[in-house]
Amino acid sequence: MNKLLNLQIINLPCCITTFITKKVIYAFKACLPVVFITIANTFLVCTTAIAHSNEISTNDLGAEFTRVIPSKDLKSGSTFISNDLKSIQNNDDLNPAFLWVLQGEALWSSVAGKSSPSCASCHGESNQAMRGVSTHYPQVDQESGELVNLEARINLCRVRHQHLDPLKLESDQMLGITAYVALASRGLPMNVRVDNQNMEHFLNGRSIYYKRQGQINLACTHCHEQNWGGKLRGETISQGHINDYPAYRLEWQHMGSLHRRLRACLSGVRAYMYPLGSKELLDLELFLGWRSSDPKIKVETPGVRR
Ligand code: HEC
Ligand code: HEC
């Protein structure tokens, strides 16, 4: 936008001189872009508040691979919840998310059709076979070359190996099986790595993270990196890590995926809510996974939130 404005300032005097030398037609032609730019500018100024706007300069944030919050200050989201919620999250008998985990456990060993083996027929015990798996998602699937999160990875097995329909995102079955698989990694540190295969996704996720969005015109970083520990509508803003998802949220009276939580943040700043499972949310999830990856940030799925 600054570039457009400069262009306008440089072009304007030049336009006027051409008018004076009576090259009216030429001047008219020369002015056209200026008129267009002025209209476009006015339109842009009016809509910046609503539309996505400028990215924060990366110079302010250091190298692409430097985490803004230093390792020594990293804290899991559960650090910021009330003591009451903590005691619910830490007690599997009280944690309402276990209603979904139990459904996931049942699905793990259920045989869906005559020719469809169960997850357990191929993988065996989840707490052995799936130990550590959720710590390194999202990941690029070697067969399709696409970035998949844990939900999408489970659906690949449904379709490729069980010859069943994919589970609907946000369905009880999907939330249950994802939480059940992630539960096998409880206590292990997040371990999402960036490499040549996923670099493009990482950079896209990162740019979404630092882009001002919505009518409120805030980027993720403004809340989760610059104001963590602060209060917002009665909630303490965390550092926005992903180690507790899927999680049970009191406001939803339901379990929900990370993508649902991200859509709630986007809705909070009145920005476009990328669809569940969309490329944008997957890329963002990869970036979030990377910034959550530290020995101090351990998988605590299923979390409990306000
Ligand atoms: C206006 C402030 C604000 C903005 C901007 C914002 N969030 Fe949030 N976010 C919150 C609040 C408040 C919560 C709930 C408390 C918490 O866990 O931080 C939350 C929760 C989260 C959580 C869940 C953390 C947990 O442990 O449960 C994640 C992840 C997250 N946000 C990511 C994002 C991303 C990615 C963006 C940008 C697309 C974003 N947020 C933008 C305020 C914000
Ligand atoms: C017929 C055998 C088979 C069945 C049934 C099966 N899987 Fe898989 N699964 C695989 C194989 C093989 C892989 C390795 C990747 C590949 O080849 O697709 C895999 C990979 C995975 C991974 C990724 C592991 C990693 O280390 O990244 C997860 C998670 C997973 N399966 C979950 C499930 C779940 C949940 C079910 C049931 C809904 C299921 N699988 C059913 C064979 C199966």
Image: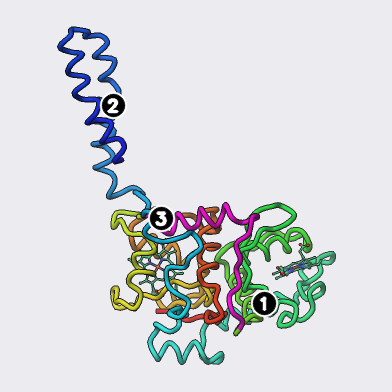
Which stretch is magenta?
188-211
Tell me if residue 196 is in the magenta stretch.
yes
* Nearer the camera: disc 2 or disc 3: 3
- Give the SS element for disc 1: loop
> Camera-side residue: 175 or 79?
79
Tell me if residue 28 is in the magenta stretch.
no
The residue labelled by disc 1 is 132
Q: Report the amino acid beneath label 1.
A: Gly
The residue labelled by disc 2 is 36
Q: CA distance from mark 1 to mark 2?
A: 56 Å
Residue 260, given in percent of the width and then of the height, sits at 48, 65
**Structural crowding at the residue carrying mark 1, measured as other residues with C-alpha within 10 Å and reported as few (<14), some (14–19) or many (≥20):** many
**Structural crowding at the residue carrying mark 3, measured as other residues with C-alpha within 10 Å and reported as few (<14), some (14–19) or many (≥20):** few
Residue 119, given in percent of the width and then of the height, sits at 76, 72
Q: Report the amino acid beneath label 3.
A: Thr
Does the Cβ of the disc 1 residue fall within 8 Å of ligand 2? yes
Q: Are marks 2 and 3 in contact (CB under 8 Å)?
A: no
Q: Quadrant of residue 217?
A: bottom left
Q: CA distance from mark 1 to mark 3?
A: 33 Å
Q: Earlier in the sequence, mark 2 or mark 3?
A: 2
- Most distant residue in the right direction: 115
The residue labelled by disc 3 is 58
- Give the SS element for disc 2: helix
Q: Earlier in the sequence, mark 1 or mark 2?
A: 2
Residue 260 is left or right of residue 82, and the answer is: right
> Camera-side residue: 92 or 183?
183
Q: Is residue 304 above or below residue 157?
A: below
